[in-house]
Every structure is written in structure tokens, then in C-alpha cells.
Image (spheres, coloured by chain):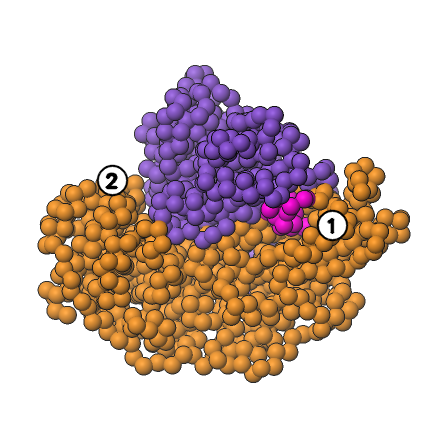
Chain colours: A orange, B purple
Amino acid sequence: MDSEQLIQLGQQLRVDAVRAADAAQSGHPTSSMSAADLAAVLLGRHLRYDFGRPDHPGNDRLILSKGHASPLLYAMYRAAGAIDDEELLTYRRRGSRLEGHPTPRLPWVDVATGSLGQGLPVGVGVALAGKRLDRVPYRVWVLSGDSEMAEGSVWEAVEHAAHEHLDNLTLVIDVNRLGQRGPTRHEWDLGAYSRRLHAFGWHTVEVDGHDVEAVDTAFNEARSTTGRPTAVIARTRKGRGVAAVEDKEGMHGKPLKDAGSAIEELGGPRFAHVEVGKPAAAHSSALLAARNGKLKLPGYEKGDEVATRNAYGEALAALGAARGDIVALDGEVSDSTRSQFFAKEHPDRFFECYIAEQQLVAAAVGMQTRGYVPYASTFAAFLTRAHDFVRMAAVSRAGINLVGSHAGVAIGEDGPSQMGLEDLALFRAVHGSTVLYPCDANQTAKLVAAMAEGEAQSRGVRYLRTSRGATPVIYGPDEEFPVGGSKLLRSSDDDQLTLIAAGVTVHEALRAADMLARDGVPVRVVDLYSVKPVDERAVQEAAERTGCLVTVEDHHPQGGLGDAVAEVFSDGRPVPRLVRLAVGNMPGSATEQEQLSASGIDADSIAAAVKLLAEKVIVR
Amino acid sequence: MDSEQLIQLGQQLRVDAVRAADAAQSGHPTSSMSAADLAAVLLGRHLRYDFGRPDHPGNDRLILSKGHASPLLYAMYRAAGAIDDEELLTYRRRGSRLEGHPTPRLPWVDVATGSLGQGLPVGVGVALAGKRLDRVPYRVWVLSGDSEMAEGSVWEAVEHAAHEHLDNLTLVIDVNRLGQRGPTRHEWDLGAYSRRLHAFGWHTVEVDGHDVEAVDTAFNEARSTTGRPTAVIARTRKGRGVAAVEDKEGMHGKPLKDAGSAIEELGGPRFAHVEVGKPAAAHSSALLAARNGKLKLPGYEKGDEVATRNAYGEALAALGAARGDIVALDGEVSDSTRSQFFAKEHPDRFFECYIAEQQLVAAAVGMQTRGYVPYASTFAAFLTRAHDFVRMAAVSRAGINLVGSHAGVAIGEDGPSQMGLEDLALFRAVHGSTVLYPCDANQTAKLVAAMAEGEAQSRGVRYLRTSRGATPVIYGPDEEFPVGGSKLLRSSDDDQLTLIAAGVTVHEALRAADMLARDGVPVRVVDLYSVKPVDERAVQEAAERTGCLVTVEDHHPQGGLGDAVAEVFSDGRPVPRLVRLAVGNMPGSATEQEQLSASGIDADSIAAAVKLLAEKVIVR
């Protein structure tokens, strides 16, 4: 396309953004208009993408980090012939694929955006996959706003991209000077961005974002720069092309008042079709298909003492040996999470993300868009750092495995800053998530494998919670642990109630049950290793047989195991008596057993609580 | 203190770190030893702190961001005479104030650390308070590790500190080259840190962290630099002083194997006492005491339609007029959250944190250490970004008010990325938290005020959830809404069940109740605006009277209102039938009413569910 065609394409994208927002009577036309020329040059001259084959392994990837500018993206799709004009005007309507912010309901959208500062970190994940796994020279283009450069997650990604020499990654910053509520911190000081990015090791180009040939030159420079990523820092004007809104405050996120004359001012509707450059021939990564068919999970002897984090690391290494699509990511704690076992055996598929949990999760999200099955692990407590990325991963329908070690007060002396005590609540509340919490090494190994198998069946965020200390192996290596299942560990016809536990509290519950049995108070014990989905049938049966369910969890009382059990009875059916034993105190430093005792979730506390219940409360 | 004394003090701090970890048989001596000379120079020559008066308004503040190096901090306390040697050796024992990571159980610790990358953002909050609120020239010293420089939150703070010209803030980076599991990204490349910080506008000094006079010069340079913050980037050696561990991998977080000979190698125990410099005379900020006694909350007419976010903004502005200690912080969305009303009336106490939610919450945490009552607001969805800071705020016993707007699917067309659907789960699971969710403007205003009053009574994280759209005012301006209370909105002697709602669903529940009453199915309606603590008595009474509780919430089914009601019955008492109506789907774009309908929480859906229950399930 020549200059004039690019200029006209830019105007077309603006007009379409205005039209879409006008049809919806909401949305973000002005934020679309500032970036329209950048988008026109990208679409007309640089992007290599087969819209008929969004799964083409050679396709460039485009991530609209400023997701509120979705009308611009949808206008690009129309110009490329991917959607028609009728669909464009369904923007933001119920049932339309053209949501307020882009989601993978559209086949050309790899990841949902709309929470700012996520596009670049996810783009880093995709670019890492391109360079180190796919080994295909596609380019990852991230179109970002200027306001979102304030997000720390962006700087985690800036650091990581330079560290990994991601010259297949281009960040385009639409510096339109105006955030939602007024001027940004740096307004049009392009140098402020340039200096920062340059200091982190990026190549940078400052450009007038409305000069199509200058933008073209900048994009060429980005494509030809090797050894480091490039940022194209473009000075633009919000609402560009319509005097009533151009570079004016208070025009964020609103349809234009007089759309008709705005469209006229922009030169009227246009219906140019862009022949987007096709990607070079490329093959899917051989890693994706590599399966030796022999998954040899580690097996552990009953009675041995093994930490579930160890079993995680060993099972992950075994899974990596059986399948080429398994990758592992670390937040600089692989010696603690034990993902080091994978790192040692499969260094090419191990990604050190340093202490940057948002980048850690984002990289996993990026890699799963390319078909890989990522396991990202750090301390359970520190996954809270990436909560927003987990939430958005669910909107992205991303299939990722997250593993949090050092769960609960059971970690002992390190104290509350290192204890995962809110993680079950976090992950259970995520849409479509799976939450697993094994109590022994064989169970852990099986669940680690199940997380990869589940990938084929359903997308979603899968979480595994592991423990620091060694726990007895209570299951044989051949036992199966389906997701959604549970294990009945103690039962008799005379059970007074049911103890429901998971992880470390299974062992406390078993000890309590043995003590209670000796004292003539038989109780049932259920290992509810699948916290979500929960084994409704088993819970219901325990309720029917014993009339009282006592949950015991190394987690705050809200949102965890107790909630999972209560949720089973949230459809109007009769509810058994319910008791929650959980961490209600603020822990300090102490040994593991002191911690469990202080929180009232050790065997003695459980037994004492059960006796009190048996005496005072239970009416059978 | 002269050079030799400083050198000896450094050795004393090392010895004490080794002794403490040896007594505990766990902990982080090597990470303490690298920073010991930095700490010695700080304590001996620069810190101005009255350990007998930790509340002295002129005290410098010291934040140990690398909280795992707590033995160093405790060794400093011993050297300063704040604790005795006996207490030092209680490190990490049950009941000791000397926890694995520092917490405010110690009077000289303002905020808990241990989740890395939090010290600087919190320090920015304290320094902002010093400059703009207290107007006292104390200095904020943040001692940080090198690994934690990978955290995005650090760069949010770096950006903000420079933007606010915080020359009362000094960041000391202990570049000991080794992270937990091996070399850091930049190892001893001090220039890598220096270039980055410089690009953001900081003054930087690179120094040999074991040369006490060079460190002294650097600290002097930091103290005399005006207009911008200074980073002292110190090259150090992990485990310095003990050959067996010095600069060796695999020595992180472990007591020294042969502590006796290590102590000998360090020159043996010393018991020097340091006369720490006293702070200059200073007065507490007049703002803290400023109360005109006339809180004139806005009042709204019954029947008017007002968004609760508007009432939040107006009530906050009124509160700010009545009390000088109220401050407001924004994540660049003040026009949406309506904190702009406060900004307009009290610009001196309004802090724009841009789109950096970790810094937003951290600044609030920092300011409350100085006695202020901060209200930090952004979209509920984006507070997930700061989950780890909220979690740590609870460990810090911080009294902060967080306000999340745009809750739930009721926001309409913007789609899931902007919807707070996990926030109740997040905040309920935080230890000691308060969670409020008002449904009308008068209720909102009263609760906004209550959040400040509660400050006096109890520390903790308080969360208020507001809505985007206008809702009818259903309470008079004189109605009271105690924290922990609820409102019974509909009741009769024949109620078939109870609808329990909060926020937007209160209005849907009321409409459903009216429809059902017309159809001969009377139901009770409870407005459970205090989600935590929950009004157990009212919930229990509704259970006794009606036998079935139906919760209706604009939130995912896990961890929110349904869980709060179920938790009431988690002590073994008889449980009523429970039904949860919540957002189980993944929303797209649609109008508010379409969203509520699609999620099954609008009046029609509620009425339909109740009829089904009344026919099929309820046995009275």
C-alpha cells in the first residue's frame, strides 16, 4: 500500500471506530483514533497473518494491550475481511463476539485484554515460545497505551524481554498524552519512555504516530533490529481527526456526540479491503507432537515421608520426559518448589522468570496460546501477586497449570508473610478453575499428570497446592485420583461425624480419628483432594450417613475447603451440620506442629472439637 | 563512630545474625551478613531514631524490604539497646516478637515485610506523608535486596518516587549477587541498576558495600541530594566474613553449619552499644488532630436514583472536610470511582498514583503508619492487582480503607475484564478484614464514615464495594448502618424463605419479593450490607423463621455472600436449607439488565428460582 492508501486506511479505521461506538452508544472511539495510523501501517505493510487460518504456525501475533480500543481492532478485522460491516456494528451487544474488550471468542484474539499492563507480559511469553520452543520467526506486536506504562507488570516484562534478547517482539506505545481522567504522568515526553526502555536494554524509536511513512520506517527498524526488542514510541493525539474531541480532556470512553458530522469530518465511510501479508510457510513445533508414550511417574513407598513439593518436581520432570509440550516456569524459587528437577532434565523447556510473579503467570498464558502446557510454580502466598493475571487468564480461556508451594501455617518458622492462607479462596473464585490439594506423594504425582491430561478436555486455570514439610505416603503408587474425586479413608457403621480434610490436615484428621476411635467415638475421614470440582456425591453420602461434616483446613476460614463443602448444599437440599476448623488466628513464628496446634487444626485440636460436638451438639 | 568502630559494629551484627540463626536452627544469616556494613554505617552515623519513643514524629523510618534478613535488623536493635541478648536468641521461637520476617509486633517495625518488592512502595507512602502531610524532615531508609528489583511493584515505586521528588527517601540496594536459587539476573553489574534508576529520574551512587567510609560518603550524598530520591547501590558479598559460605551458592536461608568457628572467624561475640542519633524535635502533623466536629454527610432523597460510587465520593469529600487525617488515593480512575469529589475539595490530601495498583495500596499502607486514614480506590477488579499488598497489610495490622467500584456484571457492556467478580472472596479471606457492600446512597455515606471511625477501635483492612449504575435510594438519610449489622426489608409471618442480598441484588430481591407476594409466595428480604463481619443474629433468626436462605450476589459463587451466610452455620448448629444465586457464567458484553438476567440474579430469575424451591424443595 502506498502512503495515500495508508492514510485513507487510517481514516477508515477511525470512521469504523466512531460508527461502532455510535451503534453501541458506548465504548472507546477516541482511544482508537489516536492509534489508527499505527494500526493502518501495521496492517497494510508489516503484519503477516492469515485471517483464514488463525492457527497458522507462521502467523505474527497482535496483542491489543490497550483493550478498551477494541473498536480499532474490530475495524482492522473488517478492513482485512475477517468480519463484515454488519458484525462490526454489533459491537458491545449481547451475544456479539465483539465485546467491549477483546476476548478469544474471536479466533484472531489469543488472549483477553482490558486489564491494562498485561499485553506486554503475555507478549513476552509468546515471543519466548517463538524463539525457544517453536523456533519460527513470527513477530509479536503489542500495541500499548501510554497510561498503562505505569503498571509494574510492564516493567517486569521490559526487563525480561531484554534479558531474553527477544528481537521478535515489538512494543508500540500509543502516546496520546491523555489517560482516563486527565494527562498521563509523562504526557508527550517520548524521551521519558525512551530513556527508561533504553536503560533496560531495548532499542527504541521515537516517531510521529500520524506520519505513516515515519511509522513504516520505525516498524522496519524494529523488524531489522537483532539481539534485543524494540519499542516504537509514537506521539499521537487522542480523538485524532475530529476537532470536537481531538486532544481534549473528558472524552475518554464515550461515543462521539455527533457521530454523523464526525464521520463526515473524517471523510465519510470507506470500504477499502486490505490484503494482509501472508505468513511464510512454517511447521508447528515438533515439541507439540513429541510423545514417547511412556509416562513413568515416580512411585513412592507407603509409610515413607515425602514432601508433596518433591513429588511435584519429580512428577513434572517425568511428564516432561514423556511429552515435548510440557514447559516449566519458575519465580526464582525452583529449589523450594522443586521445579528444579524439571530444570535439570529439560533445561530447554525451563524458563526462569526471576522474582516477577506477574511475568511468571503471563509467560505461561502466552505459551499456552502456542499449544504448550505450562506449569508455573512459586510459593502459594506469592501467587497472590499475580491474581489479576489469573483472573484475566480465565477470561482468556487459557489452559495453564499453577502450582503454589509452602501452603499454610504448616511451613513453620518463616511466619505469615510466606504462608499461603488465601490461595484456595483466590483460585476457587476464578471462573472455570480446577483446585487440587494432595496430601501424599503418589497422589501428587497422579494429579500433576492429570493437570496435563485435562488440558485436552477443557481449558481453564488449574491450581495445585503443595506443602513444604514431608508427610507420610498413605496411598500406593497405583491408586487413581480423578479430578473431582475424593478418598474415603476411615469409615464404620457407627461414625458420629465426618472429618473432611486435604493436604497436611488429612494426616492430622487420620491421627484424630484413631485417637477418637480408641475413645469410642468413631468418625469417618474423607480426603477431599479435589477442592474444585468437589466430589459432591461423596460429600452428600457422608452427610447422609453421619449427619455432620467437619472440615479441617490449613487456610483462612473463608473461601477454602469449608466453603467448597458448604457449596455442595447450596441448591436447597437438606444441609447436614457443618463445622469449620481453619486458621482463624494471625500466625507468628513457631514449629510446624506448634503452628497447627495454635491454629486448632492438629490432631489433638480436631479430637477435642469432635468430642465437644459429640457431647453438646450432635443430635442423631 | 570512627571507621574502626563501624567495622567492628558490622562484625558484631554478623556475629549476632549467625548466633540468632544458630539458636533457631533456621533463618537467613548469609543475607544478613552481606548487608551488615551498610547497616552499621546507617545505625552508627545516619539514622535518627529514638528507640525509646518509636512514635516520635521526627524519627527516621527504616524499612527492611529484604525481610528475610531479619536477624540483621534484630542485631541492630540489640546494638541500639532496644532488645537484650536474651531476646535476640528467641529468634523464630513460638511467642517471640522476633519472627522469621519482621512484623509490627515490634514497636520499631512500621510494616511487615517478607514478600519481596514491598518495602520501596510502602516507603514511598511514608515519604509522601513526610513531605506533603507531616512536613517533617525525617528520612525514609529502605534496605532492599537485589533479587527483588525484578518485582514490578519496585518500578511502580521508582517511577512514583521520582515523579513526587521524594528526596527524603533513600533506597539502599544490597547487591550480593546471589538470589535464593542462584545468581541474580544482573549479578554484580551495579551499572544495570544504576542506569535503570537514573532513567527514571533518581540520583544513584555505586559503592563497595563493605567499605564503611565509602558507604558513609554515599549516605551523605543521599541526604544532601535535593529534588529527587537517591539509590545507594552497594556491591556486597553474601555470607561476607565466613569463608565457608561467602559468595557461595546453596547457602541461602540456612543456619551456618559450624556456627562456633564462624563466630570465631568473625572475631567472636561483641557487645558494643551504639548511641543512635536522636531525631530533631518535631511536632505531630496538625492534620492528625484537625477535627471541626461537624461531619455533614450528604443526604439523599428516598426514591432518587443515585450510584453508590457517587455517594462514596461525596461522603469522602465531606469526611475530609470534617477531619484533617483523611487522605484519598487514586489509581487514575477518580472520575469513575468518584474520588474526584475529594480531590476537588482537598487537593493537598489527594494522591494520584496513576495506573499502579500495587503502589496505590502500598502508599495507603505507608500513610497509615503516620496516623492518617487513607481511602484508596480503583475498580474492584483491579484491586486484584494488589492482592499481595492487601495480604501483607493484614500482617502489618494496617488500618486502610480500600474501595472498589464497578462491581459485578451490573457494569454492563464493558465485559468481564472490568467486572469485580472475585473481590468479595479476596477481601473476606484476608485476616481481620471488614467487607461492606451498600445498596443505596445513604447507606454508602454512613458506611464510608464508619470506616474511619472503626480506625480508632481496631486495625485492619476495610473494603467497600460500590456500583457503577444508579440504584434507588431506599433508606432515609438518618438511618444507621452499624458495621456487622443488616436490614430486614420485607417480612411477614408467612414467609416461605429469606432472600439475602447486598448491593445491586437488594433491588432485584425487593422486586422479586413484590412479584412473589402478588403470587401468594411471601418471602423475607434481608440487606446484608456488612458481608464481614456478618450479622449472625439476623441470619440465624431468618433461618429459624423461614427455614431456607437464598443468597443473591453479583459475584462468583465462591467466597462471597453465599459463603458468608454459610459460615454463620459452621459451628455445628442446625443449618437451614441454603441456596446460592450467583454469577456462574462467563459474562460477555450486554446491558446491565441483560447481564443480571443472563447470570440468573435479576428479579425474574430470583422469583422463578423461589417458585421452583417452594414447589419442589421446601418442606416446612
Q: Residues within 10 Å of mark 1 (few under 14, many from 20)?
A: some
**For residue A71: magenta?**
no
Sequence-earlier tag: 1 or 2: 2
| Label 1: which secondary element | helix
Tell me the number on the disc at residue A482.
none
| Quadrant in the picture for residue A51 | bottom left
Question: Residue A508 location in percent, x, y?
Answer: 76, 53
Question: Residue A397 location in percent, x, y?
Answer: 45, 61
Q: Is residue A312 above or below residue B339?
A: below
Q: Taken as a whole, is the magenta stretch helix, strand or loop?
A: loop
Seen as rendered, the residue at the extreme top is B293
Q: Residue at x 10, y 64 (%)?
A: A4
| Label 2: which secondary element | loop
Q: Residues within 10 Å of mark 2 (few under 14, many from 20)?
A: some
Question: Residue B400 location in percent, x, y?
Answer: 50, 35
Front-lying residue, B449 or A378: B449
A324 displayed left or right of A335 = left
Q: Quadrant of the N terminus of chain A?
A: bottom left
Q: Quadrant of the C terminus of chain A?
A: top right
Q: Is residue B575 visible?
A: yes
Question: Residue A476 location in percent, x, y?
Answer: 74, 70
Q: Is residue B18 above or below residue B63?
A: below
Residue marked by disc 2: A250
Residue marked by disc 1: A544
Q: Is residue B387 visible?
A: no
Q: Residue at x 37, y 56 (%)?
A: A113
- Amino acid type assigned to the residue bearing label 2 in the image: Gly
Q: Tell me the chain of label 2.
A: A
- Magenta highlight range: A553-575
Q: Residue at x 69, y 52 (%)?
A: A540
- Amino acid type assigned to the residue bearing label 1 in the image: Glu
Q: Residue at x 42, y 67 (%)?
A: A369
